[in-house]
Amino acid sequence: MFENFSEMMLELFATSLWETVVMVGISGVVGALLGVPLGVFLRLTDRGGVLENGPLNKTVGWLVNAVRSTPFIILLVAIIPLTRFITGSSIGTAAAVVPLTIAAAPFVARLVEASLREVDHGLVEAAQAMGATTGQIVWKVLLPEALPGIVAGLTITFVSLTGYSAMAGAIGGGGLGDLGIRYGYQRFLPDIMLAVVVVLVFFVQAVQSLGDWAVRRLSHR
Amino acid sequence: MIEIRGLSQTYQGPQGPVEALRGIDLHITPGEVFGIIGRSGAGKSSLVRTINLLNRPTQGAVIVNGRDLTQLGDADLRAARRDIGMVFQHFNLLSSRTVFDNVALPLELAGMPRGEIAQRVNPLLELVGLSQLAGRYPAQISGGQKQRVGIARALASRPQVLLSDEATSALDPETTRSILDLLRQVNRELGLTVVLITHQMQVIKQIADRVAVIDAGRIVEQGRVLDVFTRPQQPITRSLIDEILPQELPASVLDHVRKLAAQLQGAGQGAVGQLLRLSYAGDSAYQPILSRLVRGFGVDMSILHGQVDEIQDQTFGSLAVYASGEPAQLRGAIAQLRAEGVEVQEVNVVLED
């Protein structure tokens, strides 16, 4: 059954796993750096928010929805000029990070917005009664109170990105998903396919467990 | 200390504009505990929130410490708010911060250095009796303890005014009592002006010096608590007082009155009876008024129902008495009661249903 697992094959697995980690890791982190402020912005400008602004909120909200509703495989090829501008190439692992990041940011933004909405408005009111500025309300009240929810949201994001990264093979991004398609499917090696799935299952389990542990540590409710 | 002039607030409801507050004038003097009582929806929460402008009124002036808050810019308003502490019904503590860090929050917001914060927070925790729980999170302490944290937090920036928005409504009676005692203590020891809103007359009775009754967005009655309790002017005030000092006579007492009246008629000696409601307070409470009446006018008095209680260290009583005797004597006795400063209300009982 395992006759296909030559030394070269194992090396290919290691490389692919690394590519997946790089793609998911970088796009997740950069996506969070873009998505968290975007989520905060959406919450603050929403109805009942500290900086309530209907038209601005609707415009940004519409943009976020537009990116989120574009199928990833289409986004991947549609933004090739942007990808080439940023990474200098439209193929390879680095090139795959750009569309993954752009897919992750609005996803994170919506999850962050939802977590912030869970923060009791009474806390914002209490901070205002203490003379807090908008910046202080965000940094001292909203983000710390929503942190467990935000971390749970980021965990979901990393897991989703792992799934998206399987499509990165379309632009030569590599990674485990690509390995599965090229060897398992196109070369009819079902044991390779199975091995890819098993590795991905453990990878996702590890990410989720780490996220759950962090949420438990952060939550004092 | 706090002066509210011509305050009105209108907001857009689903069925057109709603007038939450209408033409409110209040004058709250330094160092007093001022209670605002009303039913839910009367506008009391909107009113207390205008004092630190969490709620911006449509019209009118809110003058705290000589400055009209409605005229201040953002930065000045934030600074002014630091002189006004606020305690909330649902505590509004940050679940992500320990007891210590919750009390430290207003100081952090004001930009106080770390070292000084501890020097300020620790005595406050001692004041509210929570030094042992400094490292706990709000989820790990009881409701009463949470409100103590809320009070310590409200005091952290050393305000001159403390606003209490239904601070005891989510607490059981015993905890309510201890929280009110604490509020009274900080009022006396720190000379803090306290404005509290509540729907419970019990709270007003226990700690307020003066009270304003709010109904449908208007102040309908205000005055010293004792005066309002002994001489309520408005039906809403009477019904609020009724919750702690029931004014309605129980059916069994009314039955008894009917029996007494029937006996008098049966005896047929010209004696009449009258059910009286007597309210008295302060000095008159200590005088042997009733026994003097019995001796002086030869009337009989049966005490049927009533309470004797204490408000602001003054005895306060409300009694239902059935007086009987010669008509002239009875009138004389009632006039004498009024002359002694007792509030007398003649209650007519329907004899036959």
Image (spheres, rainbow, N blue to C red):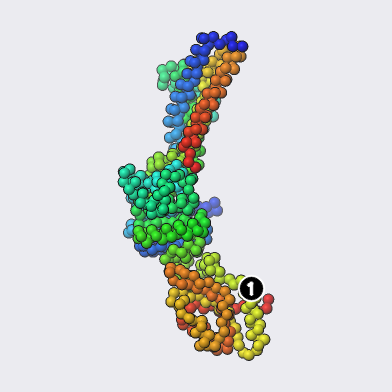
Which residue is nearer to you in this view: A206 or B227? A206
Residue B161 appears in the picture as rendered:
yes
User: Residue at (67%, 86%) from the top-left corner?
Assistant: B266
Q: Which chain is mark 1 on?
A: B
As helix, strand or loop, the secondary structure at mark 1 comes to helix
Q: How many marks?
A: 1
Residue beneath disc 1: B252
User: Residue at (38%, 41%) from the top-left corner?
Assistant: A135
Q: In the picture shown, does residue A196 fall above or below B161? A: above
Within 10 Å of disc 1 (Cα), the crowding (few <14, some 14-19, many 20+) is: few
- Going by the picture, which residue comes out furthest to the front? B132
User: Residue at (43%, 31%) from the top-left corner?
Assistant: A34
Q: In the picture shown, does residue B121 fall above or below A40? A: below
Q: Give the x, y percent position of residue B106.
A: 37, 47
Task: Name which residue type carries label 1.
Answer: Ser
- Going by the picture, which residue comes out furthest to the right? B353
Write down the quadrant of residue B347 in the picture.
bottom right
Q: Give the x, y percent position of residue B155.
A: 37, 53
Q: Give the x, y percent position of residue A120.
A: 48, 45
User: Residue at (56%, 18%) from the top-left corner?
Assistant: A196
Q: Quadrant of the N terminus of chain B?
A: bottom left
Residue A107 appears in the picture as rendered:
no
Q: Give the x, y percent position of residue A154.
A: 49, 31
Left or right of A157, for residue B126: left
